Image: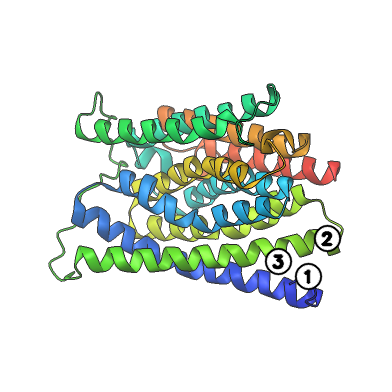
Amino acid sequence: MTETAFPYVLALFAASAVVIAAAGVVITGDADRLADKTRFGEAMVGGMLLGMATSLSGSVVSITAALDGRASLAFANGVGGIAAQTAFLSFADMVFRRANLEHASAELANVLQAALLTLLLSTAIVAATGPEITVVGIHPASLLLPIIYVIGLRASAKLREEPTWYPVHTPETREDVPSDDSSDDVAVQTLVFRFAALAIILGGAGWTISKAAGVIADRGGLSETVVGALMTAVATSLPELVTTLAAVRRGALQLAVGGIIGGNAFDVLFLSAADIAYRPGSLYHAVGNADLLWVGVGLAMTSVLLLGLIVRQRQGPGGIGFESALILVIYVAAVALQFGAA
């Protein structure tokens, strides 16, 4: 791809982004149906299955970039995607006019997932600012992150089975009630197979975007941080945008919120995978302050979201929750800072 004409590289990048968005539309419907058929619940399926699948293209971008020695692109793609996807919840809140989205989608599993995400992001910050320690070229934090993630998933599953408290239901609260649509005769196995096939398509498109992004950074005179945080991160996050808006339109509010939060938690694992793929040493110490800025931005946005999930404001400024408005302000400010530092 390094010899391909620059306009064609840009077109290939855009085409891959469209493929990712289109696959995201279909995969959302399948996730909602799987949640109903398996009785696992929208928050769990959104946080685990849908979050992982829609994050696959982004993980491929980070791994491929790390293998190519592009540390900033690999790192910024992962943490930049977390910020972009959290901002998508604000757009979903604008679409859902009945009430604040975080109020209507009350679900304890989403609160726990948001708290888990803050812990994962904090671990990444400690790794980047602490001593450069590696074991066979891998930072210990890269081994710790998946452990924290799995423990968090197990806690979410247990919480679903044996909740310790319940959110107060109001007229605006939308309950996650599994559909008993008898006309849906598609077998669970068929849905799982199709879900897996779409996930593979997302991964392939992610690989293409990664290769195109490297060329764009080299020939376009842009830093890998800008390309990773604001181009590949947004492009590979399109499934989250599409699936979130589609889920809200379907009335699957827990799935919408859980898909974003769960996908973000899974995205932190991009850093583990990229650190393993990055052979010169610790990925966390091969990046600069511009890359670490996006870890802090993701942490701030997630903290605001967590506050919104707990406070559950019915209506806020502009008909959306205070958390949605503040999340957008933080994201826009971070983008301005990024271009100002570039």
Give the secondary structure at mark 2: helix
Q: Looking at the picture, which amino acid does disc 2 mark?
A: Asp
- Number of marks in the rendered image: 3
Disc 1 residue crowd, few under 14, some 14–19, many 20+, Cα 10 Å: few
Residue ID for mark 1: 2
Q: CA distance from mark 1 to mark 2?
A: 9 Å
Residue 179 placement, left or right of 290? left
Q: Earlier in the sequence, mark 1 or mark 2?
A: 1
Q: Residue 338 sits in which quadrant? A: top right
Front label number (1 vs 2): 1
Q: CA distance from mark 3 to mark 2?
A: 10 Å
* Percent coordinates x, y for residue 142 in the rendering: 55, 35
Q: Specify the quadrant that holds the N terminus.
A: bottom right
Front label number (3 vs 1): 1
135 or 32, which is in the foreground?
A: 135
**Residue visible at 26% across and 53% down in the picture:** 35
Q: Is residue 263 above or below residue 135?
A: below
Residue 171 placement, left or right of 24? left
Q: Is residue 242 above or below residue 174?
A: below
Q: Looking at the picture, which amino acid does disc 1 mark?
A: Thr
Is residue 112 shown to the viewer in this render? yes
Residue ID for mark 3: 212
131 or 78, which is in the foreground?
A: 131
Q: Any mark on residue 210, and which? A: none
* Percent coordinates x, y for residue 94 in the rendering: 51, 51
* Percent coordinates x, y for residue 166 in the rendering: 25, 28
47 or 215, which is in the foreground?
A: 215
